[in-house]
Amino acid sequence: MNILKSLWILVMMGFVASCAPMATETPFTATDLSGKLGQGYKQKVDNALIILDASSSMYDKENANQKIVEAKNVVLHMNDTLPPLKMQAGLHVFGPTLGPNMEDSKLIYGMTDYNAADLAAAVKTVQVAGLTPLAKPLLKSIDDLKDSNGQIAVIIVSDGMDTYDQSPVEAAAALKNAFGDRICIYTILIGNDPVGKKTLEDVAAAGKCGFATTQSDVATSQGMADFVEKVFLEKEVAQPVAQRVAPAPMMEKTITMDLNVQFDFDKDNVRPREQDQLDEFAAFMKAHPQTSAVLEGHTDNYGSEAYNNDLSLRRAESVKKYMVQKFSIEPARLTTKGYGFSRPIATNKTEAGRQENRRVVAVISATVKE
C-alpha cells in the first residue's frame, strides 16, 4: 500500500509540474493596524503557527489559477496586514515530500521571532504536490509548539480535502487538549468544496475559541484586516476602581466598590490577572466590617442552561473561597448566586463579548463619617 501511495505521489508531482504554471502574488493594499496598538487595543497572541496546505488537491484544474496560489496569497496578505508584533511564528507545510526524510508534513520556518520578510520568503518557496494528510500537521504541531509560552493561534489555510483515514477533527481536539485555554484554532477555506468547508468548520470548533472563515471573506483589505484584528488583537479592559459619591448630609458619605472578575472559557478558577482587584475588594471589606456582598456568577451561552447555572455558581463560590482563605473575610458576609447565561452584558456572538459575560460581579457600599 505504501508503495502504491508513493507512486501516486510521484505521478501527481509530475502532473502538477507539467500542467500548472505558477501565478504571481495578486495586488493587495494592506490596512495599517499598527495605530491600534496603544490606542485601546493590545496584542493577545504570543505564538502564531500557520499551517499551509500544499497537497495536489490545491491544484484547481478547472480554473486558470491554482488554489495553492490563492492559499499562498492569503498567507502573504495576512503577513502584510500584521502590525509589528513581538511573538514567535512558524510556517508548517503539508502535502509535498520535504527534506532528507521525505516528510509530507514539516515545519519549514520557525518557531522563531516573527519577521515579516523571512515569513514571506518561506511562503514563496512552497510548491504543490502529494497527498493530503490533514490530520498530520495538527498532530505534529504539538511538537512544533512544545517550547511555547503564552497564547497560541493556529491558522490553517486549506481546501479541507483529506485523503487519509485519520480524523483531522480528532487531531484538532488532541492539539487543543495539549495546550488547553492557551490555544485557539482558525481555518481559512480555499475553494468551495462543501465537504472541505464542513471539515474545516469542525476543526475550528474543536479549538473552542477560534472560528472558520473563507478565502473570499479575507480577499479584500478590510476583510483581511478584520480577520487579523480578531485573531491577534483585543481591546484593553480598564480595571474597576472604587467610585466615590458626594458627601451625604450630617457629614457622612457613601463610598462604593465594584467588582468584575472575568474567567476563562469553561473555568471556575480565579486567574492570576484578577487577583489585584480581588485584593482591593477584600481591603475595602476589611476596612468596613459592617458591609456584606452578594457575589453574582455569570457565563456565556456555550452549553446547556443547567450546566451554565452550575458553572456560574461555582465561579461565585471560587471568588468567595479566595476572599475567605486569603483575607479571613467572614463567610457569612459573602452570599453567592449563579445566573448562568440569563444576564449577558455583551453579545455572545463574538469571543470578546463572551469573555465579558464570563464573570463574577458584586457591588458593596459603606457609609462613613468624615
Image (tube, rainbow, N blue to C red):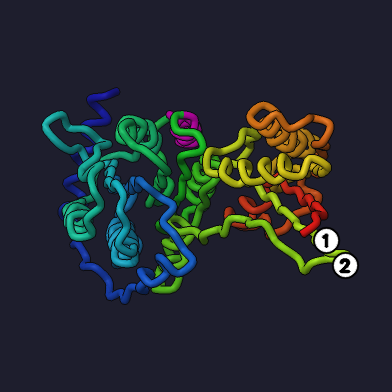
Question: Residue 168 in magenta?
Answer: yes
Q: Is residue 165 something that shows in the picture?
A: yes
What kind of residue is marked 1?
Glu
**313 horizontally vs 18: left or right:** right
Question: Is the C terminus in the top left, top right, bottom left or bottom right quadrant?
Answer: bottom right
What kind of residue is marked 2?
Pro
Question: Residue 274 in magenta?
Answer: no
Given residues 108 and 273, the one toward you in this image is 273
Given residues 272 and 64, the one toward you in this image is 272
Q: Residue at image x 17%, y 38%? A: 98
- Residue assigned mark 1: 252
Look at the picture and state if 367 lies above or below 331: below
Q: Which residues are magenta?
A: 166-177
Q: Is residue 66 something that shows in the picture?
A: no
Q: Residue furthest top?
A: 1
- Residue assigned mark 2: 249
Whether residues under marks 2 and 1 lie with C-beta atoms below 8 angstroms apart, the answer is: yes
Within 10 Å of the Cα at label 1, are there few (<14), some (14-19), or many (20+) other Cα atoms? few
Look at the picture and state if 148 lies above or below 209: above
Q: Residue furthest right?
A: 250
Q: Residue at image x 45%, y 55%? A: 231
